[in-house]
Amino acid sequence: MKSKEEELFSGQDEVPQTDSSLTPAFLATTAQLPQKISQTQLQQISPAALAYIGDAIYELYVRMFYLLPLQRTETYHHLVVAQVRAETQALHLRSLIPHLKQTELEIVRRGRNAATRRTKRVDPEIYQQATSLETLIGYLYLTDSQRLTELLQKLHLEKQCET
């Protein structure tokens, strides 16, 4: 007879099956801000600040995506890190470009231009694309959670951890 812990983690090496209803519900509840942001206030928020918020929302989305089935914390970590690295975010942005509206493309452009920090680990172009994705996610989180959900569900998150 297996212990409860053994039962919980017995499927740890299986491909995660996600409950797609979790993600929209998550985004709907996290998108409720304590106060409404006016268009004027929104225009005053820098692309870097939008990327800051977008980074947090994106990572939380990825964590929710991999939450079920239950796995070891180390496995969660490897799955999430593979998705939140700049190279993967740049790929995700490129996959979303054909689906973006003109205003969203403008936000992406602003995010790319705001990414001036130089990194040693990644090519500056990759870093700009990753920042652009985060900027778009931050903007949509503040303005249109339904559209954010629609675009996030178009991402092709990898189902297995390569360890």
Image (cartoon, rainbow, N blue to C red):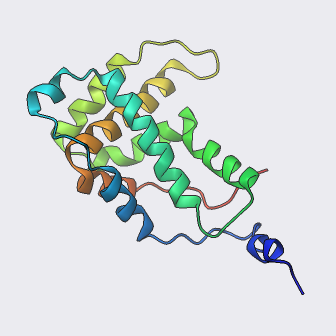
Residue at 59% x, 23% y is 122
Q: Is residue 30 above or below residue 18?
A: above
- Residue 101 x/y as whole percent: 19, 45
State left or right for residue 84 relative to residue 69. left
- Residue 113 x/y as whole percent: 33, 18
Return the residue nearer the eye: 73 or 138: 73
Q: Is residue 54 above or below residue 157?
A: above
Q: Quadrant of residue 7?
A: bottom right
State left or right for residue 102 relative to residue 71. left
- Residue 92 x/y as whole percent: 45, 45
For the N terminus, give its image quadrant.
bottom right
Residue at 49% x, 72% y is 19
- Residue 112 x/y as whole percent: 35, 23
Q: Residue lying at the far bottom in this picture: please name it.
A: 1
Return the residue nearer the eye: 105 or 54: 54
Q: Is residue 147 above or below residue 81?
A: below
Q: Quadrant of residue 128?
A: top left
State left or right for residue 120 relative to residue 152. right
Residue at 57% x, 45% y is 83
Q: Residue lying at the far front in this picture: please name it.
A: 34
Q: Quadrant of residue 38?
A: top left
Report the number of numbered marks.
0
Residue at 24% x, 57% y is 146
